[in-house]
Image (cartoon, rainbow, N blue to C red):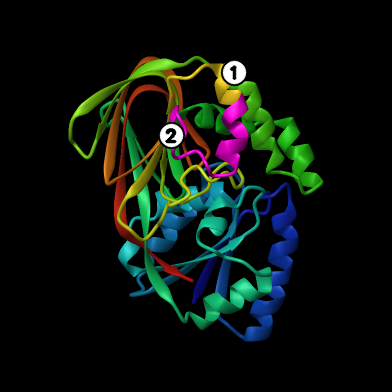
């Protein structure tokens, strides 16, 4: 039995067309399946929790949706060991699919899942904030500052809806990044990598704990990011003026920022952050709150994924 969680609103409605194509292929294949459609925020997580509770030794759970739907499902799953996870992307950003090198048509992706030729143990991340009062898993990234502020704005952006309709959804993040860069505050941060020495960082613009190379619709924040190495790639920007940061944006978008003054990428299993001023925190683009303390860690090989 294959259990499908489908978010028909993903990609400004593109998921409806994708599901129609997938359903035709499913019916042709003769595979036994059950489909659940999400109808409110958080519903995908509720459905994942329910499906994980079924009395089956091995559960094939397939998400048809975008990065936000994947995040909800990751946080709803309570028994990762028995789940074989499949994904058919329909979103505007599709950073999870990009990082996992999922390409092809929806029908082709479905056939790969049905063949189940390769199941790999994939890392995911976990962020906790305000000394454990909140906690959330992430498949792509979690961070504070500019990228989180952009993600928060994108959730309700009319610009995003418009650009999605003309297949330019990834441009949303570029436009909102420029806006945030000149409006959001910077702060002093105390950062500890892998429970080692704590260092101070002045004028922190953002910190992004990356489990994949890309976020924000294809921006390579961590060009060497890898969901199979048991580590996060933590990207920071600090200590430079807003104007400098603006002119460095093309370098960041091109993935050539690792050795540029004001940027740093650190490979680590965990990182802890304390900041003097509230900043926005996100997990896979989902708003978590405005915080002054957060801890990020890698959960190695947590997800068993059909690739």
Residue 38: x %, y % from top left: 59, 52
Q: Secondary structure at mark 1?
A: helix
Q: How many marks?
A: 2
Q: Mark 1 or mark 2: which is in front?
A: 1
What mark, if any, has residue 243 been given in the picture? 1
- Asked if residue 289 is positioned above or below residue 105 in the image, the reply reads above
Q: Which badge, 1 or 2, is on the more N-terminal residue?
A: 2
- Asked if residue 95 is positioned above or below residue 301 in the image, the reply reads above
Q: Nearer the viewer, residue 277 or 165?
A: 277
Which quadrant of the structure image shows residue 168? top right
Q: Nearer the viewer, residue 186 or 152?
A: 186
Q: Secondary structure at mark 2?
A: strand
Q: Spatial distance from mark 1 to mark 2, Cα to Cα?
A: 22 Å
Which residue is under mark 2?
143
Left or right of 158? Residue 128 is: left
Q: Is residue 307 visible?
A: yes
């Amino acid at each position: 039995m294959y259990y499908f969680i489908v978010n028909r609103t993903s990609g400004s409605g593109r998921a409806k067309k994708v599901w129609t194509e997938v359903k035709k292929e499913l019916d042709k294949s003769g595979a036994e399946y059950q489909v659940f459609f999400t109808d409110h925020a958080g519903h995908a997580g509720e459905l994942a929790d329910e499906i994980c509770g079924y009395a089956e030794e091995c559960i094939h759970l397939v998400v048809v949706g975008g990065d936000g739907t994947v995040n909800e499902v990751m946080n709803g799953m309570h028994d990762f060991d028995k789940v074989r996870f499949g994904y058919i992307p329909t979103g505007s950003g599709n950073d999870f699919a990009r990082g996992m090198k999922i390409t092809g048509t929806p029908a082709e992706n479905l056939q790969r899942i049905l063949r189940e030729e390769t199941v790999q143990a994939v890392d995911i991340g976990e962020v906790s904030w305000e000394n454990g009062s909140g906690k959330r898993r992430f498949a792509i990234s979690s961070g504070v500052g500019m990228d989180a502020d952009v993600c928060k704005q994108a959730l309700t952006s009319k610009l995003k809806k418009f650009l999605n309709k003309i297949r330019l959804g990834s441009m949303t993040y570029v436009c909102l990044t420029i806006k945030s860069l000149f409006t959001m505050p910077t702060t002093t941060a105390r950062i500890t990598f892998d429970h080692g020495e704590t260092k101070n960082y002045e004028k922190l613009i953002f910190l992004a704990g990356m489990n994949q190379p890309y976020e924000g619709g294809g921006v390579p924040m961590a060009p060497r990011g890898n969901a199979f190495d048991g580590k996060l790639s933590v990207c920071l920007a600090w200590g430079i003026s807003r104007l400098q940061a603006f002119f460095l944006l093309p370098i960041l978008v091109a993935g050539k920022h690792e050795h540029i003054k004001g940027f740093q990428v650190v490979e680590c299993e965990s990182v802890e952050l304390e900041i003097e001023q509230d900043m926005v925190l996100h997990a896979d683009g989902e708003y978590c709150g405005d915080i002054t303390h957060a801890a990020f860690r890698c959960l190695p090989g947590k997800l068993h994924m059909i690739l």
